[in-house]
Amino acid sequence: MDSGRHAEIAGAGFAGLTAAIGLAQQGWSVTIHEKSPELRALGAGIVLWNNSLQVLKAYGLLEELEAVSMVPPWYETRMNNVVVSKEDFGGLPWRSMTRHDLHEVLTRGAMTAGVEIIVDSEVVSADPSGSVTLASGEKRSADLVIGADGVQSKVRDSIGFDQERTKSRDGITRLLVPRNKDQLGPGEWDNVIDFWNLEPRVLRILYVPCNDDELYIALMAPKDDKEGSAVPIDLKVWTENFPHLAPILEPAAKIHGRYDGYQTNVLKNWSNGRVSLIGDAAHAMCPALAQGAGTAMINAFTLGVAATIDASGDMSTTLVEWEKAERGITDRCQARSAYFAETRSMAQGNQFTQEMLETAIYDPTAGQKGTFAK
Ligand code: FAD
Ligand code: 3HM
């Protein structure tokens, strides 16, 4: 199946790879430009939910992902180390994994689907008529251009999309450390555990086991807390506030890490002409609902379906129609995530209501079964 159409994609992150696999499996020729010299995911761990797991299933990649990820039995919330809630989302599929492992599954999927990935290739600008210009000066044309180049997107900024950016007062340092389960005290250490301290000091540790050996920890502190936001982490401050987690904080203090402030970026439109933005380039969000990658992947998937059908026969109109149909669920998730960042109300526990899980529950592949990898 060769559709005769070509896509140029900026960025081999979760958004770019997911879009590329979908298009290639539907017969497009696809080139991804990745500015880094090698293909790898920065960061530590990640949680995926039904929405993005369904995308991987449609692509024939779910089994591979299952082999390198785990299903934590509960999402436990603790305040000052006292359990305030245990949620299992009523059987909704979710999984935790390292970002590295998810990236490898997607990269292999893209290679198998015949996607060309060029590393050390930075896209410096895009043109709504359907082209990208690379740092090398080369200009390449395409039926569809996708800006999946993250929160600092050059595709977006070179075109000049209208956007409103809001920074939150908190931020997070994400690290991958050994599980060291046998050194932690009694506890259900396969759970995701959200350890909140609001008094006397706002500090939070999100504990996310990814597999038998690796643990993702996200250490949240207000931006104006110099010690809490320092990298490498200030071992004295963190162990004073979370003494029961010393066996995982000690190895964490040996990694340099990076502290990222939370931000929300809302664009007026996600497309202009033949250029469409997906992932953090289009809708960077606060992490509370763990949906940044999930929404990146569902929008990457539905974009590939819409562009292939191209119902209007004119790509720029098709992209506008796609955004109209798909955007609401991401906008609502972004607003809810910003609310949780603003209020820190995840600390109360039991916050994953059906309404808050709307995006996690969504199955973007409904009606598309059988279109993709056989
Ligand atoms: P990126 O991952 O940023 O990928 C962009 C890619 O483009 C990179 O490879 C980059 O090198 C490349 N690139 C950049 N510029 C160019 C260019 N000009 N030319 C070519 N290549 C370029 N989401 C979840 O779903 N679950 C979670 O549990 C979760 N936890 C999170 C925790 C924190 C603290 C934060 C901050 C985010 C979290 N997210 C989570 C969000 C998620 O990580 C992001 O939303 C997701 O990685 C976005 O993917 P992306 O592909 O759009 O962008
Ligand atoms: C998985 C995950 N979930 C929530 C947050 C958060 O609220 O900061 C971060 C995460 O990596």
Image: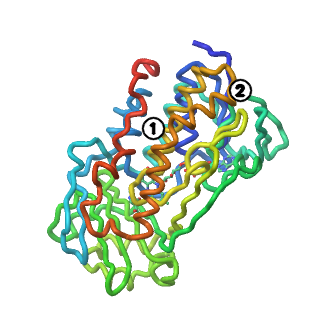
Mark 1, secondary structure of its residue: helix
Callout 2: CB less than 8 Å from ligand 1: no
Residue occupying the point 37% across, 80% down: 238
Position in image of residue 121 (x %, y %): 72, 44
333 vs 156, left or right, is: left
Q: Amino acid at mark 1?
A: Val
- Which label number is shown at residue 105? 1
Mark 1 or mark 2: which is in front? 2
Q: Amino acid at mark 2?
A: Asp
Position in image of residue 301 (x %, y %): 50, 33
Mark 2, secondary structure of its residue: loop
Q: Give the residue pinned by disc 2.
A: 143
Label 2 crowd (10 A; few <14 / some 14-19 / many >=20): some
Position in image of residue 343 (x %, y %): 40, 70
**Residue 33 location, quadrant:** top right
Alpha carbon separation for disc pair 1 and 2: 27 Å
Between residues 145 and 323, which one lies in front from this camera angle? 323
Residue projecting furthest to the right: 137
Mark 1 vs 2: CB contact within 8 A? no
Between residues 50 and 314, which one lies in front from this camera angle? 314
Between residues 206 and 115, which one lies in front from this camera angle? 206
